[in-house]
Amino acid sequence: MTPSALLHLAAVGLICIAFAVSACATPLSIIIARKTGAMDVPRDERRMHKRPIPRLGGLAIFISFIVCVLIYRGLVLSGFDWAHDPLETIPKLTAVIVGGIIIFFLGAIDDTLNLPAKVKLIGQIACAAVVFFMGLRIPAIKSFGWHFAEDSPGGLIISFILTVFWLVLITNMINLIDGLDGLAAGVAGIAALAISYSSYIHGQYTAAFVMIILAGSALGFLPFNFYPAKAFMGDSGAMFLGFTLAAVAIIEPAKSSTLIATVAPVLVLGVPLFDVGFAVIRRWLRGQPIFSADKEHLHHQLTALGMGQRRSVLMLYGISGIMGIAAIVFSRNLYLEAVGLFSIAVVFILIFIWRWNKHDS
């Protein structure tokens, strides 16, 4: 069997194992959620469900991801030829695992105790700082032309700020779209698959394999989370997915420019990015706190138009898929084509927002 065939076989095997472990662990997470009181009770009109639902499904995603990443890490360290992976990525992979563990437990505590938003933000920043000091960082000093030595105090400060901002931003983007059954898991799965393929064609095998594992973990949970949901992933799952997407995207920036390493995931996550952007603008214009909650997110607007949860989620899957293809095209330096695809997706989003505003008035 050729090395390429072994590579493909390993990828298929890992995504299948991740899917199976996640699917098998979800019923366990439901039992634990009920016993610990980690239930999402619909106490306000923002909630789309009518009955209490377990919200510790992130445990299944977390278990699946950690198990499969440790399998991959072991294969790399054992010297399998199909990995084609430099051992210098292993410390960064370890940083991803440590950061994922911290962010998961932060989310799990929030799912049980409902932590204040400021406390969660401080925890996210602390988690990002741990990952930075473990060596996983955005080496933007050289890539964007700043005249700082990478190991100088000024260079480290700028790199620290960029890395923490990047990790916290993407972590919260996934968390904020977790408002309809299956939306966050599906969008994260699509994003992970797109980034995995983009990494693979550039020879970034660690990022490719870890992303495909993340996709399998998210998609394995989806049958329990799609409408009507039997379980929610909660903050433990949403923050874990967002943090891992952001961290793995910068795990091998030396093989491509920092611009591609960071812009491609932004393109893939265009739906939550626009949703967050419009929410910030909307609340600022109304004089409301930026972190206040409302029922005017994009997914709320689609359901208000009478599309229902399933059609709304499937529509957003489609838009995310277009943006995922745009990210892959962008990573291959086809910038005009990427802009064209991304513009099509943006037009669909703007049409939905315009129709909702017209309907609301």
Image: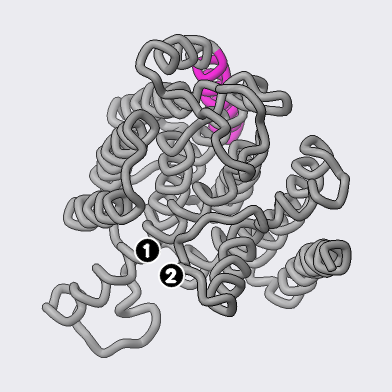
Q: Quadrant of residue 45?
A: top right
* Residue at the bottom extreme, as displayed: 147
User: In this view of the protein, can residue 135 be seen by the observer?
Assistant: no
Residue span colored magenta: 1-23
Element under label 2? helix
| Residue 160 picture location, percent across and down | 24, 68
**Mark 1 lies on residue:** 254
Picture residue at 37% right of the left edge, 63% below the top? 254
| Residue 262 picture location, percent across and down | 48, 65
By what rule are the colours in the image chosen?
A: one colour
Along the horizontal axis of the image, is 37 left or right of 187? Answer: left
Q: Which mark is residue 306?
A: none
User: In this view of the protein, can residue 203 be seen by the observer?
Assistant: yes
**Mark 2 lies on residue:** 258
Q: Quadrant of residue 132?
A: bottom left
Picture residue at 43% right of the left edge, 17% below the top? 33
Task: State the residue in front, 219 or 1.
Answer: 219
Classify the position of the N terminus by image quarter: top right
Q: Characterize the magenta stretch by its predominant secondary structure.
A: helix
Picture residue at 32% right of the left edge, 42% below the top? 115
Element under label 1? helix
Classify the position of the C terminus by image quarter: bottom right
> Hey, what amino acid is under mark 2?
Thr
Up-down relation of residue 266 to residue 25 (above or below): below
In reply to whether residue 319 is colored magenta, the answer given is: no
Of tags 1 and 2, the one toward the viewer is 2
> Hey, what amino acid is under mark 1?
Ala
| Residue 82 picture location, percent across and down | 47, 32
Q: Residues within 10 Å of mark 1 (few under 14, many from 20)?
A: few
| Residue 214 picture location, percent across and down | 50, 35
